[in-house]
Amino acid sequence: MNLIVDKKLVQGETWVTIHKDGTVEGKGPKGGSISGTWEWKDRYYCRRIVIVGEVMPHDCQVVSIADDTVTFTHKDGAGVSVRWTIK
């Protein structure tokens, strides 16, 4: 997690920052806010976030990093994978 904490993660016009203090902030593709909290639980990144006022379900994800890209795979590694560029 040290490779991505407090760094901007970018996907097109969307960005998020996963802060060391356990908070998440960012902007969605249309400028809407992203906010929430996160924790490391066993081998998973678990987060509770709100995107433009909509509460997303609690989700634990597998995290993998290659070069300047981080991939989060939802539903304990069994769901959709989302890639972000680390800035």
Image (spheres, rainbow, N blue to C red):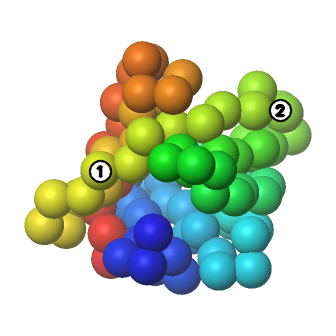
Q: Position of residue 74 (x, y in %)?
A: 49, 29
Q: Position of residue 30 (x, y in %)?
A: 59, 46
Looking at this view, is 17 or 52 the one in front? 17
Q: In this view, does 10 lie above or below 50?
A: below
**Label 1: which residue?**
64
Q: Where is residue 29 in the image (x, y as percent from the top left)?
A: 52, 46
SS for callout 2: strand
**Label 2: which residue?**
54
Q: Which residue is outermost to the left?
A: 67
> Which of disc 2 and disc 1 is earlier in sequence?
2
Looking at this view, is 22 or 33 the one in front? 22
Residue in the picture at 43% in, 54% down = 13
Q: Can residue 20 be seen in this view?
A: yes
Task: Estimate how packed mark 2 is, as few (under 14), some (14 to 19) or many (20 or more) residues with alpha carbons within 10 Å.
Answer: few
Q: What is the quadrant of residue 46 in the picture?
A: top right
Q: In this view, does 22 lie above or below 84?
A: below
Q: Are marks 1 and 2 in contact (CB under 8 Å)?
A: no
Q: What residue type is labelled 1?
A: Ser
Q: Which mark is residue 55?
A: none
